[in-house]
Amino acid sequence: MIRIAGFFRYLKRNPRLAVGLSFVLILVLFSGLGSLLVPGERAYPLATTPNQRPSLQYPFGTDSQGRDLLAAVIKGTYLTSRIGFTAGAIGLGIGIMLGFLSAYYGGLLDTIIRWVVDVLLTVPGLLVLVVIASTIRKGMNVNSMALVVSILAWMWPTRTIRSQVLTLRERAFVRVAKLSGMSDLEIIFKELMPNLLPFLGAGFVGSVTSGIFASLGLEALGLGPMREPTLGMTIYWVMYYGAFIRGMWWWILAPILVIVILFVALFLVSSGLDELANPRVRRAV
Amino acid sequence: MTALMELRNVTKVYTGGLFRRRTTVALEDIFLSIGGERPTITAIAGESGSGKTTMGMLLLRFLTPTKGEILYKGQDLAKMSREEWLTFRREVQAIFQDPFEVYNPFYKVDHVLSVPIAKFHLAKGKAAERALMEKALLDVGLRPEETLGRYPHQLSGGQRQRITVARALLLQPRLIIADEPVSMVDASLRATILESLRNLNRDLGISILYITHDLATAYHICEDIVVLYQGSVTEAGDVDAVIKNPKHPYTQLLVRSIAWPDPKRKWGKVEVARSKEKKWPGVEWDEATRSCKFADRCPFTTDICLQKLPPLFQTESQRAVACYLYKDAPILEGNEIGKVLGQKG
Amino acid sequence: MNGELLQVKDLRVYYHTEAGPVKAVDGVSLSLGRGARLGLVGESGCGKSTLAMTLLRLIKSPGRIESGQVLLEGLDLVQLPEDKMRQVRLGQISLIPQGAMNSLNPVMRVKDQIMDGMKDHSEKMSQAELETRVYEALDSVELERGVANMYPHELSGGMKQRVCVAIAISLRPKIIVADEPTSALDVVIQRQVMETIERLQSALGISMILIGHDMGLMAQSVERLAVMYAGRLVEVGRVEDIFSEPLHPYTLLLISTLPVLEAKGTFKGIPGITPSLLNAPANCLFHPRCPQAKDICAQEVPALIEARPARWVACHLDEVQR
């Protein structure tokens, strides 16, 4: 109980985290409740009359293939977020493993991992993804999209986690832990990792953001899962069907609005976590 | 009769700087023996750059020597079996300088006591564990109800440092390396903590290596002292004698600089030649010219001081001085340094 | 008392936290003559650093000067508007803060840091004049001229501390407040830095307030000593008098916990822990740890009175008050 109260008290002092998390909550509710209230089939083509302006029956209007845009955006939020979170999870998971091992053990292992990561970071990511995505083309669905964007999501976390662990490794409390009989792996998980939780959280959010961004890019180029109404695919259809020229503003607005809220939310959460992770910025208890 | 821990001709060299240009010798050809028949309480005294912290790190095996061996109970640390290693880890403990850094800010202070209890199987069950922690805290003068369950930032520096002493007490090691344990604690609290250390030595038979630059406290709790200057031993012996009657010019400088709390005993107006205060203390490794390291500041420098590093001369049964002023005394070989240390009955 | 350079009268500085007021400085009065050396000694958390910061009006919210005066040659610094106070800082009264070596700007050369303060204060000085002053300042703290072009990370601890001293005296202030200036330094360097400060201070006629917890350093460096406990002064007097005959029980205990050359043997600490300054009660704050506490000690705050000539003590004990 005390910890929950303490958490809310902290939020009052960290407005960015508070606002960011509220936005995330809004989107979760939007997507969650939405999927209960609006039947999912309507997010797919030929569900209804195409090219309708927003009305009471179709609050976001419909697109040229007959999708109810409200349903499409509700489903799309969920799908795109899932892609992002998968990328985030994989990125963070690999980042933790490689970053911790590399920093803690040093030596040859560290040199190899560092070299691989540095080389891969210089490769233009989007090009790699485009090549991979166009190879998969026919078989692309939401899950494979998630895996594809995850390919790029682990390198940056590895690097930043490594440098954080390097600073922690020399701290006196690690020495005390060794003298207390802890093994190296125990030290990594029980002593170092808890101190990095806010930092890992920020890294996670960063990976999620870049995963979503990459997926939007690929989908807008037409390399996404054609059948699913992800946010990026909606944008693709907007361009394919020339919605701008035809003045179908509702079609453009719907996905953009959600994307903006999503990115702002992720940014604020990441920024808020940065403050949590940096003890000098954080005000004392 | 084996000493508990020994340094045999240990040298530690750091290479650093851009393009590996700078090599710093932190410790050079050091011999030392600790413990043995009776538990010893020895001071390692020196300023920054003397190598004293490096010595502590080597003894705890957080660093490995560039040359020489370090032995625990006669066993070379580099060649220990897993079991011997675990025993070493348990029996040689440390108290560090910074009372805040030794705590993981994520955990309550209990963590630093409960982890070794668990890892070394010192108590069975939660109740026994708690009892053990409470007793250790009471033994160092802390009240368990005011300290357990708190986070490090909620306690004062003095309390935190006393908890680390309690931790050492708990483990009942054979040797404690105390690296400047009171320099970051208020002067008025130092007495309590140092008394605890002395009690550990006297009542529990634990050998203590007290690394410090504060000769006044070293005088009070230690029996022997080894003075280091830029990686070499300059003077070693009985602490009373060394401090009341320092023989090496560097030791004399150190003793004269002690800030005794006595307005009648002021520092005095004796000018001391300043050494060039360098950013990276420690001597550059240069095979060609080897001289006494203190030669540039010493008021008594002669020709031979500039040519060769002086060996240790045994001037009394309990004293060795590395200075050519005493060249008529017999030379003490490095590995005999134990003779001037720890001989009290 | 008149003609004193600095007079602090009944100063109170409280930190207003969510949990209540922390009375860091609770009714402190003292005075400092020209060219004099005053020591302020106390344990961590007794309020001495707060007092130092208050003398330079550097206290920030949630801390606030509740009441009292700080008179520098008759001018009350507490009431001074901020722009005038800025002129007073460094120009008339300067501070060597605790851990000063670590508060040098890592990306500025030493000479720029010294000039920084000077530029702010003076009427237009030419670059050449400023540089001359910088070299003078470095000379006076026995640093080579080459140091002027170095960055802080290229200097050792003692050298950085000397740079801080150089900055503090660069404008020939009337008072230097030194808060634990040698706490992280080796004993030999400590002596050298303290001797440099003292030499400068006598040569330039600057008064000094030395703040710390090390009675040994006080014995070596100051003429008069004020002992502070939990936000209040408990004893003030000449340093020789205090050491030879400490009157307040706390002072007595403080001195007896120190190592001395003659008496090797047990040296004991002071039992108990320092009190929290939060919601401090209105009685003698030392009485829970005092071996000679009486009933009245738990009820009334003892006033600082002149128990002997030139000796002030705040204690209820009869022998003290005589």
Image (cartoon, coloured by chain):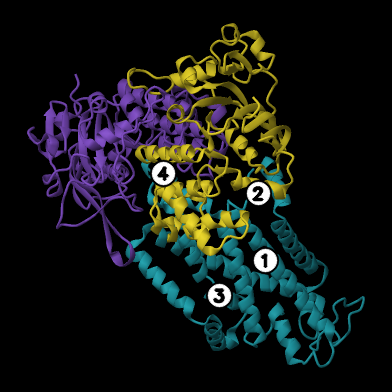
Chain colours: A cyan, B purple, C yellow
Kind of residue at badge 2: Gln
Tag of residue A177: 4
Residue at horizontal 61%, vertical 28%?
Answer: C31
Query: Is A87 situated above or below C68?
Result: below
Q: Chain of mark 4?
A: A
Disc 4 to disc 3, C-alpha distance: 38 Å
| Contact (Cβ within 8 Å) of mark 2 with mark 1 | no
Q: In x, y percent, where is residue A194?
A: 53, 50
Find disc 2 in the rendering and name its residue. Answer: C87
Q: Chain of mark 1?
A: A
Kind of residue at badge 1: Leu
Query: Is C284 situated above or below B17?
Result: above
How packed mark 3 is, by other alpha carbons closer than 10 Å (few <14, some 14-19, many 20 or more), is: some
User: Tag 4's secondary structure?
Assistant: helix
| Contact (Cβ within 8 Å) of mark 3 with mark 1 | no
Q: Quadrant of residue B43?
A: top left
| Contact (Cβ within 8 Å) of mark 2 with mark 3 | no
Does mark 1 fall on the same chain as mark 3? yes
Disc 2 to disc 4, C-alpha distance: 51 Å
Disc 2 to disc 1, C-alpha distance: 47 Å
Q: In x, y percent, where is residue C261?
A: 33, 22
- The tally of labels here is 4
Q: Nearer the viewer, mark 3 or mark 1?
A: 1
Q: Nearer the viewer, mark 2 or mark 3?
A: 2
Between C309 and B235, the one lying in front of the other is: C309
Residue at horizontal 38%, vertical 54%?
Answer: C144
Find disc 1 in the rendering and name its residue. Answer: A266
Disc 4 to disc 1, C-alpha distance: 36 Å
